[in-house]
Image (cartoon, helix red, strand yellow):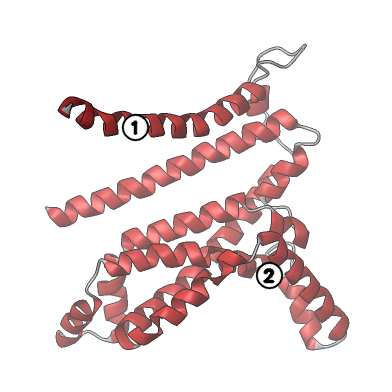
Amino acid sequence: MAGVTSTGPGHGRRLVLLIAGLYFVVPIACALAFSVGIGSPGQQVSLDAYTGIGGAKGLAGSLVLTLKVAAATIAVVLGVLVPALLAVRIAAPRLRTLVQAVCLLPLVVPAVALGAGITTLLRWGADRYYGTPLFDGLVALQDPEFPVILVLAYALMALPLAYSTLEAGLSSLDLRVLVEAARSCGSSWPRTFIHVLLPNLRGALLNAAFLTLALVLGEYAVAALLGYQPFAVWTVVVSGSEAQMSVAVSIVGLLGTWALLMLVAAAGRTKRLEEAS
């Protein structure tokens, strides 16, 4: 009886892991089979979809746009959240609930609604302020080479993810002790922020940056509604004429994202081992 009791939970965990593994692996395996032509009538198995990725029309431009927007989004999210959360925890702890509510609010706004709202606002602004300096500002926000409006939209969408990650990192630190120790040694506030607080938040910063990057790489609705063609939109557009290549690019992007996640996790483990030693 004791043996049944001890092995039951283990079998249950293995079953859950098996189901979860199949849930993720089966669609990827099917996509991989389709991309190489397995199961396609009258088509030979080949890697043409993968070898042709480098010369795909529009891929390089969409990737460059995506990476530029991702870098700017990460900078905006971390540049706004990190000082705000540190200031709230150190100087105004009573505001933590308000800040949490504001940061998590984008979770209840669907991406389609956000994109439609931004489009409507931009159209109204263009009609209302045509011929004024504000109109020129609205045009600059929508520059196809570097759409600032897309950066702002993605920063808003990434806010809940980055907030949760940074809040978890901050919860593991005794900020008051760190700040008081640094200040008692004569460190200025900027020096304390850069040389004391940020190094202790390295793991949380990397995780927040990774989650923001993953969101920008995979987000489709807002970019499509605003009329831009980053990586996710290009993948959908090219699927109409090059379905296999579209799937192949998606698989390569997914594997790249996983590899980046492993690098972030490895960096975090290395940091913890160095601290422990």
Q: Position of residue 79 (x, y in %)?
A: 46, 73
Q: Amino acid at mark 2?
A: Ile
Q: Amino acid at mark 1?
A: Gly
Residue drawn at x 25%, y 76% is 175
Looking at the picture, does residue 67 appear above or below residue 129?
Answer: above
Q: Quadrant of the rendered structure where residue 28 is?
A: top right
What secondary structure is found at the residue carrying circle 1?
Answer: helix
Q: Position of residue 205 (x, y in %)?
A: 38, 62
Give the residue pinned by disc 2. Answer: 149
From this viewpoint, which residue is outermost toward the front? 1
Q: Position of residue 192 (x, y in %)?
A: 27, 79
Looking at the picture, does residue 72 appear above or below residue 56?
Answer: below
Label 1 and label 2: CA atoms lie apart by 48 Å
Residue drawn at x 37%, y 45% is 263
Q: Residues within 10 Å of mark 1 (few under 14, many from 20)?
A: few
Query: Of the residues tagged 1 and 2, which is closer to the observer?
Result: 1
Q: Quadrant of the rendered structure where residue 237 is?
A: top right
Q: Which mark is residue 12?
A: 1
Residue drawn at x 62%, y 70% is 152
In this orientation, which residue lies closer to the viewer: 40 or 6? Answer: 6
Looking at the picture, does residue 99 appear above or below residue 271?
Answer: below
**Residues tagged 1 and 2 counted as in contact (Cβ below 8 A):** no
Q: Residues within 10 Å of mark 2 (few under 14, many from 20)?
A: many
Q: Is residue 264 left or right of residue 195?
A: right
Instruction: Tell me if residue 142 can be seen.
Output: no
Q: Which mark is residue 72?
A: none
Looking at the picture, does residue 55 appear above or below residue 149?
Answer: above
What secondary structure is found at the residue carrying circle 2?
Answer: helix
